[in-house]
Image (spheres, grey):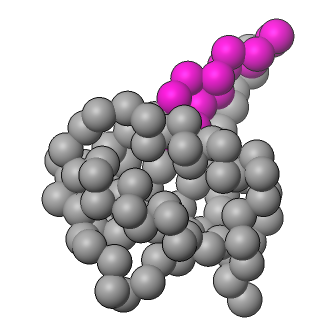
């Protein structure tokens, strides 16, 4: 069941969409009404079918590095068929 993004998810999405890349204008418009499902390391994103489709250069057009104490990680934004589709947080340790 889709739900509103929580504050952290919303902040992460805004951070990832603050960078300029092909298709970001349409993705920013989609983000205005995005909803989510699932909790955890990967959340699915849902946008209205009426939202403008983005033309992006890859399925993960933007990502961010997360440096932690004793681990490295990152944030990925996924786009499928021109629509926001998922946020993922990942990490690795030694």
Where does the image place residue 41, in percent across and percent down from the top left?
A: 72, 52
Place residue 34 in its image quadrant. Answer: bottom right
Q: Quadrant of the N terminus?
A: bottom right
Please tell me which residue is depicted at 49% across the width and 39% down the height of the picture.
16
Q: Is residue 82 left or right of residue 88?
A: left
Residue range of the region highlighted in magenta in the rendering:
64-76
Was residue 23 drawn as part of the magenta stretch in this picture? no
Where does the image place residue 76, in percent across and percent down from the top left?
A: 51, 43
| Residue 50 visible from this viewpoint | yes
Please tell me which residue is depicted at 65% across the width and 72% down the height of the picture.
36
Please tell me which residue is depicted at 26% across the width and 73% down the height of the picture.
52
Place residue 21 in its image quadrant. Answer: top left
| Residue 81 visible from this viewpoint | no
Q: Is residue 15 left or right of residue 24?
A: right
Please tell me which residue is depicted at 24% across the width and 71% down the height of the picture.
53
The tally of labels here is 0
């Amino acid at each position: 069941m889709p739900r509103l993004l929580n504050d952290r998810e919303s902040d992460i999405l805004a951070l990832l969409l603050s960078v300029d890349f092909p298709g970001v204008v349409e993705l920013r418009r989609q983000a205005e009404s995005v909803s989510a499902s699932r909790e955890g390391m990967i959340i699915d994103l849902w946008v209205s079918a009426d939202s403008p489709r983005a033309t992006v250069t890859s399925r993960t057009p933007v990502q961010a590095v997360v440096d932690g104490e004793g681990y490295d990680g990152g944030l990925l934004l996924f786009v499928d068929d021109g629509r926001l589709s998922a946020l993922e947080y990942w990490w690795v340790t030694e």
